[in-house]
Amino acid sequence: MWPSDLVKYGRDGPLHQRAYAISKFLLGQDTAFDFDMMIYKSPHTATETPWHQDEAYWPSGMTDKRAITVWCALDEATLDNGAMWYIGGSHMEPQLREHRNASEGSHILMTDDASEDEPGAVCVPLRPGSAVLWHGRTCHYSRGNETDKIRRTFITNFRPEVGSASHMSRVA
C-alpha cells in the first residue's frame, strides 16, 4: 500500500496525474487522492481475488459513496494470468451486495452473490500501460495466474476529499 510514499514526488508522475484528472472529471471538483498500491500475481498460482465491491471495505456511516479506482496493467493482463472481471451495471444497484470474510480470520471480503456466469460479467484483458476504471460499488474479481509470467498492476484510488483517508490531500 502507498508505494508513492516511498518515492519522492511519486504522485507527480503521469499515472497519478492522469488518473486524478479523469477522477475529478467523473466525480467532481472535490475529488482527491485516497491511496495507491501495487499488486502482483505470481506465476502458477491458483489464488483468486474473490468477487467483491470495494465499498464493502468503507466505514459504516460514510455518506458520500463516490469513488474511482484506476487499475493500470504493468504487464499484459489476460484471462489466464488474472485479468479483472467486472459485472456491468453493478455500480448502479440500490444496495451493496452481502459480503463476508473470505476465510476465518481473514481481512479479505467477498460476496457469494456474483459469478462469471452472471449477466453482464466480462473479463477485461489489458496491454501494459492500459487502464480500466471502476466505481466503488462495481462487482469485480480475478482468477489466479496459470501462466509462467508474473502479472503486476498499479492501482490508484480517488474519493471526495471530505471524510476520507488521511492520504487523500497529497495529490493535487
Image: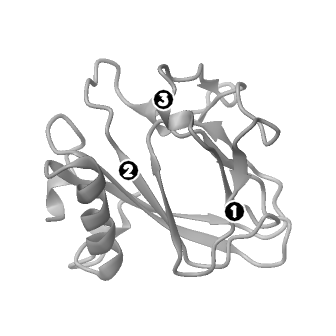
Q: Mark 1 highlights which residue? A: 83
Q: Position of residue 107 (x, y in %)?
A: 55, 33
Q: Mark 3 highlights which residue? A: 56
Q: Position of residue 27 (x, y in %)?
A: 27, 48
Q: Is residue 91 above or below residue 85?
A: above
Q: Is residue 167 above or below residue 42?
A: above
Q: Quadrant of residue 97?
A: top right
Q: Which mark identifies residue 15?
A: none
Residue drawn at x 53%, y 40% as measured from the top left: 138
**In which quadrant will I find the N terminus?**
bottom left
Q: Which mark identifies residue 68?
A: 2
Residue drawn at x 61%, y 43% as measured from the top left: 88
Residue drawn at x 47%, y 20% as measured from the top left: 94
Residue drawn at x 63%, y 79% as measured from the top left: 127
Q: Position of residue 135 (x, y in %)?
A: 44, 44
Q: Quadrant of residue 87?
A: top right
Q: CA distance from mark 1 to mark 2?
A: 18 Å
Residue 117 visible within the image: yes
Residue 133 left/right relative to 58 = right
Q: Tell me the kind of residue under disc 3.
A: Ala
Q: Say which element carries label 2.
A: strand
Q: Tell me the kind of residue under disc 2.
A: Ile
Label 2: how many Cα within 10 Å (few below 14, some 14–19, many 20+): many
Q: Tell me the kind of residue under disc 1.
A: Ala
Q: CA distance from mark 3 to mark 1?
A: 21 Å
Residue 53 visible within the image: no
Q: Earlier in the sequence, mark 3 or mark 2?
A: 3
